[in-house]
Amino acid sequence: MSPVSSINICSIRNTVAGCVVPFSEQDTGLTFKSNEFERAFEATLAECSIISREEAEHFVVKGFVLVKGAFSKEHASHVAEHAWRELEMAHGVERNDPTTWARPSPGPGPAGYTRLKGSEKQHQLRTLAPRAFHAHLDLVGGAHRLPRNGDQLAWGEGVISNLGIPDDPRWQPPAARQPGWHKDGWHFRHFLNSPEQALVTVPLYSDVQPKSGGTYLALDSIGPVARLLLDSPGGIHPDSVQGGGYLIPGLADQCSEFGELTGEAGDMVLLHPYMLHRVSINPSTRPRFIANMAPVLSEPMKFDREPDDCYSLVELATLHALGKTSCNFGQERPMQGFKPFPFRDENEKRLEGEYLREEMQVFAKKGYVSPDWAQDCGYMSNRAMSDSESVHSVSPGGRFE
Ligand SMILES: [Fe+2]
C-alpha cells in the first residue's frame, strides 16, 4: 500500500517529548503487514465514498481523521454565537472582557471550560452536513451499521467552551502522567466489541490553533486499550476508564505519542472510540468551541468477519493495533448500561462503589495494577489490592471532554 507520509490532511500536531512536529512528517503507513489484512482493507476502502485511501490508512494506523470542511462555517458561527450568548446570560462571562472568562463554571475542567446546553434544536446530519454524514458511514462500515440507516445521526447545538486564560502558567504539553485521561463512555460496560460508542465525533465551531485549548490525544493508546479489552471478556466497569479511573494510568503509561486537536471552524475530527484524551489548559486569547458526540452502532463490532462481510475502518484499526488479521472475541457477559456517576444518588454511588471495588480487586489479581503515580494525578488506585483488600477510594472523576 502506498505510504501516507506525504499527506498533509490536518493541522493536528503530534507532540513527542515536548516538541511539536508537523503531522505530515510522521510515518503513518500501515505497519502491520499481512495479505489477508490488506485484502480486507481494500474491500473496506472500496465501499468508502469520501474518505480517501490516505485518510483511511491514516485512521487505521493513527486512530483519527480530520475531515476538512465537514460542515459550513455559517453553522459553526451560528453555534458559537449562541454559546457566547449563553455564557453571557448564564455564567456572567463578557465576550469583550477576557478578565471575565475565567469565572468559575459548574462541572469539572479548568476555569473557562464550560459545557453549554445550546438551543433545543437538533439538526439531522444527513441534511446539515453531507460530508460529515458520509465520513461517519465510511468509518463505521456503511449506513446499515447505524440505527435507522444513519437517520438517527443528529447534532444539537451544545458546546464545550475553553475560553482561555492568557499566559496561564499551568499549561503543559501533553504527557502520560497527567490527570483526566479517559476513554469516552461513562454509561456502558466496556467490551472490545461495544456498540454504544461507534466513534468520538468532534465538530470544531471555532478555529483551534496549537496551544489554544485543543483536546489532548494519546495517539498510540488504541493498542493498549484494545489489548486490555481483548483480555477482559467480561468487560470493564465504565468508572475504571473515566477521568479518575484506576485502569487509566497503566494505559497512559504505555503511550509515548501525544498530540493536540487543532483545525478550523467547520472541520470535524473523528476519533477511534478507544482513543484516550483529556482537556487541556488554554493559555491563549483564542476561545475554543467544540462539541463531543457519541454515535452508536446498531450491532456490536465484529473482528472475525467472513470475506464477503466488510470490516469497518474502526474494526480494522482495532485489529491493526492488536497486530491481528482477525480475532474471535468471546464475550462472557451481556452488554450493560450504567447511570453515569455524576447522576447517581447516594445509595447508587455506594452500591456501584462496592461493585467497582470488587472488580478492582479481580483486575489487581490479574496483574492490572495502577502505577504508583496514579493517585498523585487524581486517579483511583488498586495498587494496595494486589496483596491486600485495602483500596484507595477516589471519585471516578469528571468527564473532561
Ligand atoms: Fe471524552
Image (cartoon, rainbow, N blue to C red):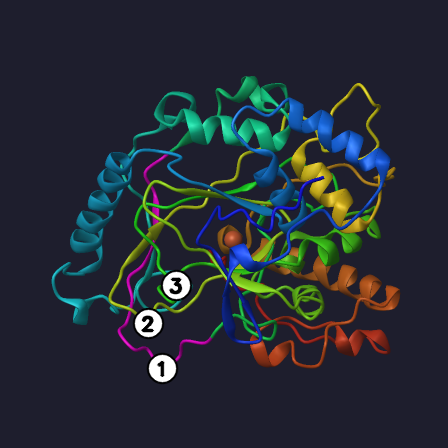
Residue 204 position (above or below residue 213): above
Which is nearer the N-term, disc 1 or disc 3? Answer: 1
Residue 313 occupies which quadrant of the picture?
top right
**Circle on res. 259:** none
Residue found 55% across the figure and 23% down from its top = 49
Question: Which residue is denoted by mark 3 in the rendering?
Answer: 210
Say which amino acid is labelled 3: Pro
Residue 225 located within the stretch drawn in magenta: no
Inspect this view and state whether residue 326 appears: no
Q: Is residue 261 visible?
A: yes
As displayed, is residue 201 above or below residue 113? above
Give the crowd class for mark 3: few <14, some 14-19, many >=20 residues within 10 Å: some
Residue 50 x, y percent position in the rendering: 51, 28
What residue is disc 2 on? 283
Query: Label 1: which residue?
Result: 169
Asked if the residue under mark 2 is in contact with the one under mark 1, i.e. CB atoms within 8 Å, the reply is yes
- What amino acid is found at the position of numbered circle 1 in the picture? Pro
Dot 1 or dot 2: first in sequence order is: 1
- For the residues carrying marks 1 and 3, which lies nearer the camera in this image? 3
Task: Please state the extent of the stretch shown in magenta in the rendering.
Answer: 156-172
Q: Could you tell whether 14 is left or right of 102 in the image?
A: right
Residue 218 x/y as whole percent: 59, 61
Between the residue at mark 3 and the residue at mark 2, the CA separation in whole angstroms equals 10 Å
Q: CA distance from mark 1 to mark 3?
A: 16 Å
- Looking at the rendered image, the disc whose residue lies closer to the viewer, 3 or 2, is 3
Q: Residue at x 80, y 74 (%)?
A: 385
Q: Is residue 163 magenta?
A: yes
